[in-house]
Image (cartoon, coloured by chain):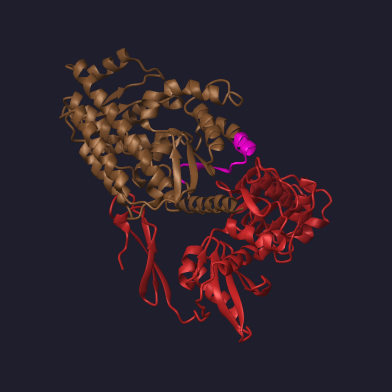
Chain colours: A brown, B red
Amino acid sequence: MSKNNQGAKKILSFPQMGNYYIPVKYLFKHIFSCEIMSPPNITTKTIELGSKYSPEFVCTPFKYTLGTFIESLDRGANILVQAGGGCRYGYYSELQEQILKDLGYEFTFVNFVTAGNRNIKNILKEIRKFEPKFKKIRALYYLFITSKMIKYMDNIDHYIRENIGFEVEKDSFIKLNNRMLKDFSKVKSYYQLRKLYKSYFMKFRELKINKPENCLKVGIIGELYTVMEPFANYYLERELASYNIEIKRYTNAHYLVFEKAREVKKYLKYASEYIKYRMGADAHDNIGRTKYLCTHGFDGIIHIKSSFCTPEIGAMPIINKICKQYNVPVIYFSFDANTSEVGIKTRIEAFYDMIEMRREK
Amino acid sequence: MKECYLGVDIGSISTKGVIIDNDNNIIKSLYIWTEGNPVEAVKRLISKLKANLPKSIVIKGIGTTGSARKLIGLMLDANIVKNEITAHAVGTLSRIPDARTILEIGGQDSKIILLDNGIITDYSMNTLCAAGTGSFLSSQAKRLGVDVEEFGELALKSENPVKIAARCTVFAESDLIHKAQIGYDKKDIIAGLCRSVVINYLNNVGKGKKIKGPIVFQGGVSKNKGVLKYFKEILHEDVIVDKDSHLMGALGIAILSKKYRTEKTYSLDINNISFETIGSECKGCANNCEVLKIYKDKVLIDSFGNKCPKGAVKS
């Protein structure tokens, strides 16, 4: 299955996660001279491909991103970009590169986080592998726009999550969001982006909702990839919204890239009776959030992770303890390629019944 | 005229039906095997329930629960379709209002429900594994050449249950063969199996849950006296088994259908209705969702299984 994409036109691709392919593609399109290919949507085939070539007990984000890489390579990509996280994900790039090379693919692998370390010098070195004439100043400008775009997207997402369960016209939020993302991807300047954001924010506020004063509120916490990629959590948020529940979720791209470093210290201080030091990835953040959700009138907490996610497994007993203490119900979901969708629906339905019954009493 | 409600619980192994009156008394009940065909099983169930039913009874509500609840809900035009966790809790609370813990072991799934003042406070269901469920026991019974109904009685006779490595159904089976081959008595092996079901359940589903009395044990496996004995022994508490413990899900959903009743009257003549399901694969994208179309009297009434609007079947 040797696929030689080398020598032909340079085509760059990257892993898929939620709607974030739009700002990422926007950034790359403006700072690199090569062609940028959007990663294909995640489907059952992606996870099948990913699982086939992954170590069995690796977590699902590895499998999803590997599957996406294979699909991108098959569509002609020859430069792949990967970035790491604060857990063993930080070491995934090297392994994925090796697996893909062993499969006979030829490509340039650009790894922004080497062995868990992120530094500018290294990133520049990696970029020059395929873009010798890389312009730093131009890149900084577009990086700024992209960061704002992500922030705006996340702000809108936040509003959507709070209100989508109460929309009067079916799918009105999703349709407007899709239109907004399409417009975002075409902006030329920061000024234009900001204007668009403001006008769309107004439009979102004008969408009719039928929201009762004290609706049920649920917080979603957990491992970042599973939280952010709807396919990986079996469209959990959509399912919850169908029960008219307001959803609160913290983890988003803006938080991870720009706020996390600052926020972590706050969380550690806020939940100091439960946790003293960092536990890797988002585990300590989630413990802090659990305390917040428990003390701010939320009816329940849903903790989701991919199977074998070590930091979250470490956080779960502490989350359990906090929830017991404040008497807030919590359920845990572990998703992997073989999760039964029916089982998830049954548990969510029972969870909804439970929090509703508690409200009635 | 007597107003009654029908509750149907369609599980993987067995299908249960009850008819209750306004005071939650069971007028008629039935427990049959699903045999892999929920539609046929429900037809059989209803025709048997219907037989000899007093003329004065009118059905004012139908509820469905269990793994085939959605399909059968459509077929019977139920006024409520609910998950088995809620149904079991409601059913149990109608009999034992102060219950704090419900241990439920069914054919393929097992669950634990914690209650406080009559509301569910916590629950969990087995996820990855079916060791410690009814099918595990029935497959082992077959291997040992014992009727699953006699299993409990035999287990009670044993004085030293054999320790069986029962983390996983398949490994338990090999350990069981090994124990039989080196000459352990059959009743000791059976007692060991019952004990391992309890241990597995508590380690798997009951992990991290505070089990408080009154404890109620239900589901098909609750009829097994051996398992009950080891639950009592290991939990050091009394465990209540209702005489209708195998019908609690159906009872619960019947009570819920009473709660959500409308003015509509239901007929139980479903034998003549043709009910068909046709599965097809959506070719819209690489997800290849399996879309199931449901026809009642040759008319498409619903479809499900699609992840996105692309796979929606228009009638």
Task: Name the side, left or right, on which B109 lies relative to A40.
Answer: right
Q: Residue furthest top?
A: A121
Q: Is residue A329 magenta?
A: yes
User: In percent of the image, x 28 and y 54: which residue is there?
Assistant: B284
State which quadrant residue A112 falls in. top left
Where is residue A106? Give x, y as percent.
25, 28
Q: How many marks?
A: 0
Figure check: A195 above or below B224: above
Segment colored magenta = A320-338
Q: Is residue A145 left or right of residue A43?
A: left
Extreme-front residue of the structure: A213
Task: Please tell me whether residue A230 belongs to the stretch shown in magenta.
Answer: no
Which residue is at 56% across, 49% downward?
Answer: A355
Q: Which residue is at the front of the view, B241 or A34?
A: B241
Location of residue B294 in the rendering, given as x and y in whole percent from the top left corner: 39, 68
Q: Nearer the viewer, residue A146 or B175?
A: A146
Residue A102 appears left or right of B271: left
Dividing the picture into quadrants, the one containing residue A156 is top left
Q: From this viewpoint, is residue A105 visible?
A: no
Give the vertical position of B27 relative to B176 (above or below). Answer: below
Residue B272 image point, x, y percent: 46, 82
- Residue found at x 42% / y 24%: A260
Q: Quadrant of the N terminus of chain B?
A: bottom right
Q: Can I make out residue B32 in this image?
A: yes
In the picture, the quarter occupied by the C terminus of chain B is bottom left
Residue B285 at x, y percent in the picture: 29, 50
